[in-house]
Image (cartoon, rainbow, N blue to C red):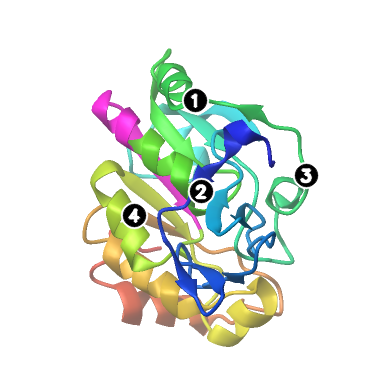
Amino acid sequence: MDREETLKEVAYYEDFKGYLRCQVCPHFCKLKDGQRGICRVRKNLDGKLFALNYGECSSYGVDPIEKKPLRNFHPGSMIFSVGTVGCNLSCGFCQNWQIAKGEPQTITLTVEELVDLAGRGDSIGVAYTYSEPMMWYEFVYDAARAVSQAGLKNVLVTNGFINPEPLEALLPYIDAMNIDVKGFTEKYYKQACGGRLKPVLKTVERAVKAWHVEITTLLVTGLNDLPEEPRIYLNEVFYPNCIEKY
């Protein structure tokens, strides 16, 4: 992933006490020269922070929109789905760990190629999915603008673990999101996912004001499946603002 054509300087980072501090997600990774972040796809190279996976595609295909899963966003339609490598969480139950944490083969897509693929056949646009699209942020941002300008839809399937500023920058170009809320306590996020709940809640609270949003939660036996937890979470935190409440 260090090939020259896949490097893109990250928009959100700062010099911080001899390190580069990434500001894309709430980990705020502090990186010395040559170090990568938790996501594995951002690296300090000679005093600049670069995304290593710009345009690098590990998975693609045309899927029913319900597979994202989105139940009430253009039901019955098809969408071109695309993903990369890397993730900023470390869930022990990950279904796509080969691309999230492994070293899969990839192909390089340009923004123009993606727009062309997304406009073929019955596809209504692009779903950024499979791996974590916020860790493909630099490419997703450029692609989402072009896809939107082409009159097509942009869908994010995301863990929601992103900082407010990059989230806001994407806001004008996204039409729908499925946010995978992993669990309902900070303890669960820390122990099972290597992250934090509060930033995810902030993402959901912001997203429902602008986009069509649906929530997915994978219940893991003995970890986050207490009967009262999902009910408390949805009723007290999101209702009545959440577009989809299950």
Local secondary structure at mark 2: helix
Q: Who comes first in sequence, dot 3 or dot 2?
A: 3
Total marks shown come to 4
Magenta highlight range:
145-158
- Residue 51 is left or right of residue 125, and the answer is right
Q: Who comes first in sequence, dot 2 or dot 1?
A: 1
Q: Nearer the viewer, residue 226 or 47?
A: 47
The amino acid pointed to by label 3 is Glu
Q: Is residue 74 visible?
A: no
Assess whether residue 149 is covered by the magenta stretch: yes
| 141 lies above or below 21 | above
Q: Work out how far the residue at label 2 is from the one at label 1, CA to CA, in angstroms.
A: 16 Å
Residue 218 percent coordinates (x, y): 60, 63
Assess whether residue 166 is covered by the magenta stretch: no
Q: Quadrant of residue 165?
A: bottom left
Q: Are marks 2 and 1 in contact (CB under 8 Å)?
A: no
Q: Are marks 4 and 2 in contact (CB under 8 Å)?
A: no
| 5 lies above or below 29 | above
- Label 3: how many Cα within 10 Å (few below 14, some 14–19, many 20+): few
Q: Work out how far the residue at label 4 is from the one at label 2, CA to CA, in angstroms.
A: 16 Å
Pointer 2 residue: 133
Q: Quadrant of residue 44?
A: bottom right
Find residue 110 and name its label. Answer: 1
Q: Work out how far the residue at label 3 is from the one at label 2, CA to CA, in angstroms.
A: 17 Å
- Label 4: how many Cα within 10 Å (few below 14, some 14–19, many 20+): many
Quarter of the figure that contains the C terminus:
bottom left
Pointer 3 residue: 103
Local secondary structure at mark 3: loop
Find residue 213 and name its label. Answer: 4
